[in-house]
């Protein structure tokens, strides 16, 4: 069974940093690109970024709203994906989901339950 | 960035009646590989999004056949032939022909009358 489990969400002050994790199981993690999508409370979905597989040189891409403040990484030996959030702003407050495409190109067919990041003083 | 515009933003439907959601993209979603990268997701209350339709008109595994998708280029529609109580939630269209960024529509909230 495919599982994606996010963790690391917390309350953090503006300007602070946080690293979120996504533990993957039930599929060949090393072959899969991993994406992060966030959702502020009561709002829509916003793609944050992605990291591709080793075969695709671990290429990353980011949304303009987070570029320069966010780094996505992965550890294939542990089947883990990460997102490092720096210089956090109140508008980064959201539930962060990790998601991937296993059966279909360019879609998100599996999602985790998300982890909540709250940026507030 | 490709802008995805959904209408309506909310929908109230009597069980058994049809529903329709429109999604328009600011650029064509037809890729040179012949595929159109337009997807529909449903986010039920308290849950992560779940994939409903891929490449415009293909139902994902387990999706009931009362859901159908159509359209091409920049204009797309999700239809529910007979709405059921379990269809409540927010529907999103998404494009992934171009990244960064992948973009979503604003969402359409479906409620039952």
Image (cartoon, coloured by chain):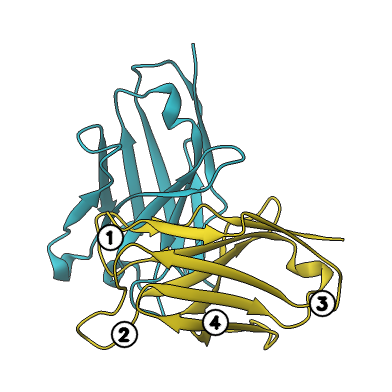
Chain colours: A cyan, B yellow
Q: Nearer the viewer, mark 1 or mark 4?
A: 4
In the rendered image, the residue lying farthest to the top is: A121
Rate crowding at label 1 as few (under 14), some (14 to 19) or many (20 or more) other CA atoms within 10 Å.
some
Work out whether disc 3 and disc 2 sit on a shared chain.
yes
Residue in front for this viewpoint, B101 or A61 = B101
Q: To which residue does mark 4 refer?
A: B69
Residue in front for this viewpoint, B17 or A31 = B17
Rate crowding at label 4 as few (under 14), some (14 to 19) or many (20 or more) other CA atoms within 10 Å.
many
Find residue A15 and report its horizontal and vertical position in percent. Answer: 33, 17
Q: Secondary structure at mark 1?
A: loop
The answer to whether the residues at label 2 and label 4 have Cβ atoms under 8 Å apart is no
Q: In the displayed structure, does residue B17 sit left or right of residue A91?
A: right
The answer to whether the residues at label 1 and label 2 have Cβ atoms under 8 Å apart is no
- Identify the residue at horizontal 87%, vertical 61% (top origin): B113
Find residue A65 and report its horizontal and vertical position in percent. Answer: 30, 37
Cα separation between marks 1 and 4: 36 Å
Return the chain for callout 2: B
Work out whether disc 3 and disc 1 sit on a shared chain.
no
Cα separation between marks 2 and 4: 14 Å
Find residue A36 and report its horizontal and vertical position in percent. Answer: 38, 51
- Identify the residue at horizontal 69%, vertical 50% (top origin): B46
Q: To which residue does mark 3 refer?
A: B17
Find residue B21 and report its horizontal and vertical position in percent. Answer: 60, 69
Placement of B19 over or under A18, stated as above or below: below
| Residue A76 numbered mark, or none | 1
């Amino acid at each position: 069974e495919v599982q994606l489990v996010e963790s690391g969400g917390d309350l953090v002050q503006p300007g602070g940093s946080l690293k979120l994790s996504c533990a993957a199981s039930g599929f060949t993690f090393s072959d899969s690109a991993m994406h992060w999508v966030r959702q502020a409370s009561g709002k829509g979905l916003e793609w944050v970024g992605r990291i591709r597989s080793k075969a695709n040189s671990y290429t990353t891409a980011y949304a303009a709203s987070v570029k320069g403040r966010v780094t996505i990484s992965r550890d294939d030996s542990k089947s883990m994906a990460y997102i490092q959030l720096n210089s956090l702003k109140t508008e980064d407050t959201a539930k962060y989901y990790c998601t991937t495409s296993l059966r279909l190109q360019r879609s998100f067919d599996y999602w985790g339950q998300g982890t909540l990041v709250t940026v507030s003083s | 960035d490709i802008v995805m515009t959904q209408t309506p933003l909310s929908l109230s439907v009597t069980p058994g009646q049809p529903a329709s959601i429109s999604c328009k993209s600011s650029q064509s979603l037809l890729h040179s590989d012949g595929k159109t990268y337009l997807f529909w997701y449903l986010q039920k209350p308290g849950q992560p999004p779940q994939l409903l339709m891929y490449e415009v008109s293909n139902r994902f595994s387990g999706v009931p056949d009362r859901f159908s998708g159509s359209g091409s280029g920049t204009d797309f529609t999700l239809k529910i032939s007979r709405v059921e109580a379990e269809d409540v939630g927010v529907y999103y269209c998404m494009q992934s022909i171009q990244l960064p960024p992948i973009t979503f529509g604003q969402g359409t909230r479906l409620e039952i009358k």
